[in-house]
Amino acid sequence: MASRDFDCIVIGAGIQGSFTAYHLAKSGRKTLLLEQFVLPHSRGSSHGQTRITRKAYEQDFYTQMMEECYQLWAQLEKEANVKLYRRTGLLIMGPENGRDFLLFKNTLLKNKVPTVTLEPSEFSQHIPHVNRNPGDGAIVDTTAGVLYADRALKAVQGVFHRLGGVIKDGEKVIDIQTGPVVTVTTASGVYKAKSLVITAGPWANRLLSHTNLQLPLQVVKINVCYWREKIPGTYSVTKRFPCFIQTECKEGKYHIYGLPSNEYPGLMKVCYHMGSETDPDERDRQTDRWDIDILSHYITRCFPGLVPIPAVVESCMYTVTPDHHFVLDRHPSHSNIIIGAGFSGHGFKFGPIVGKLLCELTLGLVPSYDLSPFKIQRFLSQPKSAL
Ligand SMILES: Cc1cc2nc3c(=O)[nH]c(=O)nc-3n(C[C@H](O)[C@H](O)[C@H](O)COP(=O)(O)OP(=O)(O)OC[C@H]3O[C@@H](n4cnc5c(N)ncnc54)[C@H](O)[C@@H]3O)c2cc1C
């Protein structure tokens, strides 16, 4: 095999591409992972210090996938000898009879995830310095916590490299020739492989245009806001303050979520689960701040211990599908091209299992989970898709 010939090429070294490459290398495939930017970088969706991981979901299939995912994260911690997870619990607050709150609660209970329900009378004793909305229920997924994102990405890429995988960063893919052997051209080389995996995050449709496919993906910029504690440590991870999700509230249509102060001492990360549309190559030209206004109002009302003006605002992108579920599927016209896309702002925690599933699809194995929620076919009635 020539040095530019591989069993598999993976385009995109975010969390999903990196875990796919890791699983392919583990199954003995000669694998190339291509990344357009020099690593590490902060221009996609997988950078930053932290992400929430949880079993709490509105749908059973995600909760069930997370069961194994926790084990796979722990395995990577062992292989890379690094701590990637800190258990904090996840507090879910929302109108007791609201649709989203009930979906979370029912999925947790049905799947026997360890939880604690907080009655209004005991709420402030367990969760001090938070004003619960009147009529809100509160339930804690005690398995949840924080994943150290930048560290995780470095760890999975490190293990992939140790397994003999090849990473070429600073190599933007500019062309894909389909066929039984796929030819991938970057600014500095031409590579061939029997299979190709496209995990290009916000750039997915740019890559897919080389294969005559477009998916209904919306790329949005997220303002990642950190808010100063009036008294440092009030909402700190060291004081066992949990991550949280606020479902339906009067400030906005989408969820608000937060993580205890941790990575930047004295600052708590609280974000809105949606943003404004952006071109991924011109992210910083998107300067809308309506989401920050929503957060300021919510923080003034519910988190009195935070200054309601963000002290730090970083940027990240979501790639959102119409139903907010992922795309994990084979290309409809080219069976040796596998697609992982549209992680809709909640894909990081699934990295190990997404990688495993994309690897299984690549190798023609029966996937470990039912992939029907993630099929491209579901978009056939969507006007933006051209299958
Ligand atoms: C602010 C924020 C908070 C989030 N919070 C959570 C959370 O709490 N929990 C959770 O589970 N998830 C969370 N997510 C979602 C999660 O981070 C994403 O779903 C996940 O990182 C998506 O990874 P990806 O590999 O698909 O995309 P990316 O990380 O964007 O990776 C795609 C890669 O492909 C590369 N690429 C693109 N085009 C080319 C090309 N032509 N040639 C070569 N390389 C190319 C890009 O440069 C990029 O590195 C959050 C996301 C954001 C933005």
Image (cartoon, rainbow, N blue to C red):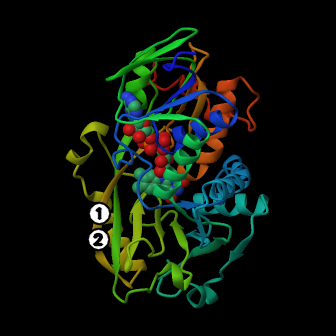
Q: Quadrant of ligand 1?
A: top left
Screen quadrant of the N terminus = top right
Q: Which residue is label 2 attached to? A: 310
Quadrant in the picture for residue 369: top right
Q: Residues within 10 Å of mark 2 (few under 14, many from 20)?
A: some
Q: Nearer the viewer, residue 378 or 44?
A: 44
Rendered position, 61 above or below 56: above
Residue 94 pos. (x, y %): 55, 68
- What x and y, as percent, mark residue 365? 75, 27
Is residue 344 visible from the viewing direction of this image?
Answer: no
Instruction: Name the residue carrying label 1.
Output: 313
Q: Residue at x 63, y 46 (%)?
A: 352
Give the x, y percent position of residue 105: 68, 64
Give the residue type that dot 1 points to: Val
Alpha-carbon neighbours of circle 1 within 10 Å: few (<14), some, or many (≥20)?
some
Who is closer to the viewer here, 188 or 210? 188
